[in-house]
Each structure stands twice: as C-alpha cells, then as structure tokens.
Amino acid sequence: MQEEITKHSNKIYKAVKKSEHTLGEKVKEIIIEICIIVFAVTLSISLHSWSEHRHQQEEVRAFLANLRNDLKNDVESIDRELGMYQKTNADYEKILALTTSQLDSIYKSKGKVNFPIHSHGQTMTIGNYESFKSSGKLGYIEDEKLKQKILNYYQIFVPAANEVDKMYTEFLFKCFDKEIENADKPEKELYSDPKYKKTLAYLVKLGKNNIRVYKENTKPLAVELIKEIDKELGK
C-alpha cells in the first residue's frame, strides 16, 4: 500500500512539473491521482477491517464451541450434585427421625448409625470463560442477549452455586466437630443430643436450599445457554 501511495504521489509531482500541459490538464491529472490514492487507502482499510472482524468472529465461534462443552459438563456435574444432596439429605433425615428407643435397639444389636459424608466443592468449569474474559475478547460477541446471559451465568449464578456449596461443607464440618467433642461418650448420646440434632437439621435445610439453587437457577440457565449457543453456531 505504501508503494502504491508513493507511486501515485510521484505521478502528481510529475504532472505538476509537466510544462507542456496546461493548468487545467495538470489539475485534472492531480485530481485523478488523488482519487486513486483515496480509493486505494479506503479499500485497504475496508479489507483490513473485514479481515480483522472475520478473525474476531472465528475466535468467538471457537470460544462458544468450547463454552458449550463446558456447559454440558456443568449440567452433568449439577445432576450428580443434586443426586448426592438428595441422597445425603434423606439419610440425615433418617438419623433425625431416630428415637431414643430406636437408637438403643440399634446399639444393643451391635449395629451402627451410618453418617454419610459428601462435601461439595467447585462444580462448574470456568477456565475457558475466564481466559476469554481476561484477554478482553468478550466484546467480540455481537449478540448482546447471548453475551449478557453468559455474563449472568459466570458472574452471578456460578459464584452463587459455589458459595452455597461452601456454606454447606462448612456446616458439615460443624457436625464433625460435634462428633469429635463427644468422642468420649457413647455414640447414641450424640445422635440424641438436641444441639447435635439442631445442627444436623440445619444441614438438611442448607441441602434443600442448595437443591433449589441448582434446580431453579443454575441448571436452567446452563441448559438455555447451550440452546442459544447452538443457534449462534448454526448460523
């Protein structure tokens, strides 16, 4: 492009220097050369912008394809977590329902009360999103509604799900602390202790809340995003 501009600039210079041409002819040649330069520069800028835009959209498509895989994994992880929350909640409720006579009967028959353990940690995959965001490329996504849903999912719903999981695990450890505090007493006294039962009952409440968060908030948006990305990639 620089060579073309130089070539046509030289032509303008030569046109000015041509003594055999009239002023009108010189002006005409100069205008033609200027128009050629302007057209060439404009075309070059347009082609560069088109090429850059095309490259950006290729990056967006690759990102969305990777994000779709992450979201599918998220849905599977959520389903597993929901299953574990439901299972442990049911088991904890059985423990809460045990009466003193039932506990006596269990321990007289050399049985034990099964206390299930399942701590909940990071469930969602955020690597691809964080990488694309940190590179400042989220603005490449032209569908504003899709971009907003992606931002809502990763900036609001994923942190919320992680937070409720963290609260649940912290309260689960409170139950462990109670068990350690009562390690020198018969186990049946622990399970009939009002404070311990209150702690366990609150753990069940947290579990039910977390099931609601996953079922009503996180999973529906993940499923919706997969559908929206499928539409975008199908264009």
Image: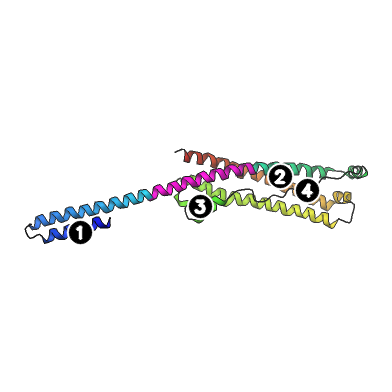
Q: CA distance from mark 1 to mark 3?
A: 44 Å
Upstream in sequence: badge 4 or badge 3: 3
**Position of 2 relative to 215 (above/below):** below
> Seen in the image, is 129 located left or right of residue 191?
left
Is disc 4 surrounded by few (<14), some (14 to 19) or many (20+) residues within 10 Å?
Answer: some
Q: Quickly name the residue at label 2.
A: 208
Image-based side of 4 in relation to 232, left or right: left
The amino acid type of the residue labelled 1 equals Ser
Quadrant where the image shows the C terminus: top left
Q: Are circles 2 and 4 on residues that touch, CB within 8 Å? A: no
Q: Which mark is residue 201?
A: 4
Q: Which residue is mark 1?
A: 9
How many angstroms separate mark 3 from mark 2 (CA)?
34 Å
Which span is picked out in magenta?
Answer: 52-77
SS at mark 3 in the image = helix
Taking 212 as reference, is 204 left or right? right
Quadrant showing the N terminus: bottom left
Q: Earlier in the sequence, mark 4 or mark 1?
A: 1
> Residues under labels 2 and 1: Cα distance?
77 Å
Measured Cα–Cα span from mark 4 to mark 3: 42 Å
